[in-house]
Image (cartoon, rainbow, N blue to C red):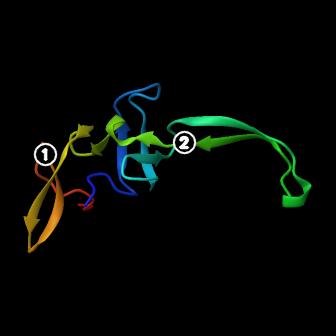
């Protein structure tokens, strides 16, 4: 079970995009995630008429290491750590600071 999952709102805690918030779009592997609007680079592509690609400058989201992001707690307005607790016979993610279950909209 992963502490940060697809669809979680995270905040960047290190690097050039520090203090930026975004939603996790996907987990690339166990150590990297792609976050919306974070680590965006410009890629220059050549036109390829066979693939119907016009070419030009394309913005692209690159992966960021999972140690550089923390899950965002909307109740406190800060980054927070996550722990696992047993609730109703299943494991759930819980914010460490206030004990609320992660991902449940109130």
Question: Whole-percent x and y of residue 81?
Answer: 20, 43
Dot 1 alpha-carbon crowd within 10 angstroms: few under 14, some 14 to 19, many 20 or more: some
Check the picture and name the quadrant holding the C terminus: bottom left
Q: Write down the residue under mark 1.
A: 96
Left or right: where does residue 83 sit relative to residue 39? left
Which residue shows up at 29% across the image and 45% down it? 71
Q: Are marks 1 and 2 in contact (CB under 8 Å)?
A: no
Q: Circle 1 — which element?
A: loop
Question: For this rendering, which residue is in front, 68 or 92?
Answer: 68
Which mark, by number, is residue 87? none
Question: For this rendering, which residue is in front, 36 or 1?
Answer: 1
Specify the farthest residue to the bottom: 89
Q: Write down the residue under mark 2.
A: 62
Vertical arrangement, residue 19 with respect to residue 53, above or below: above
Of the image marks 1 and 2, the number of the one nearer the N terminus: 2
Left or right: where does residue 43 sit relative to residue 89? right
Vertical arrangement, residue 50 with respect to residue 66, above or below: below
Specify the farthest residue to the right: 49
Q: Circle 2 — which element?
A: loop
Specify the farthest residue to the front: 30
Specify the farthest residue to the top: 16
Vertical arrangement, residue 44 with respect to residue 5, above or below: above
């Amino acid at each position: 079970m992963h502490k940060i999952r697809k669809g979680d709102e995270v905040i960047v805690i290190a690097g050039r995009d520090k203090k930026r918030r975004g939603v996790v779009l996907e987990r690339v592997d166990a150590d990297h995630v792609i976050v919306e609007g974070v680590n965006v680079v410009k890629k220059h592509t050549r036109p390829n008429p066979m693939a119907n690609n016009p070419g030009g400058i394309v913005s692209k989201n690159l992966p960021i290491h999972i140690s550089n992001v923390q899950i965002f707690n909307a109740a406190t307005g800060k980054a927070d750590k996550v722990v696992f607790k047993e609730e109703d016979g299943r494991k759930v993610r819980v914010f460490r600071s206030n004990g609320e279950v992660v991902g449940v909209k109130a």
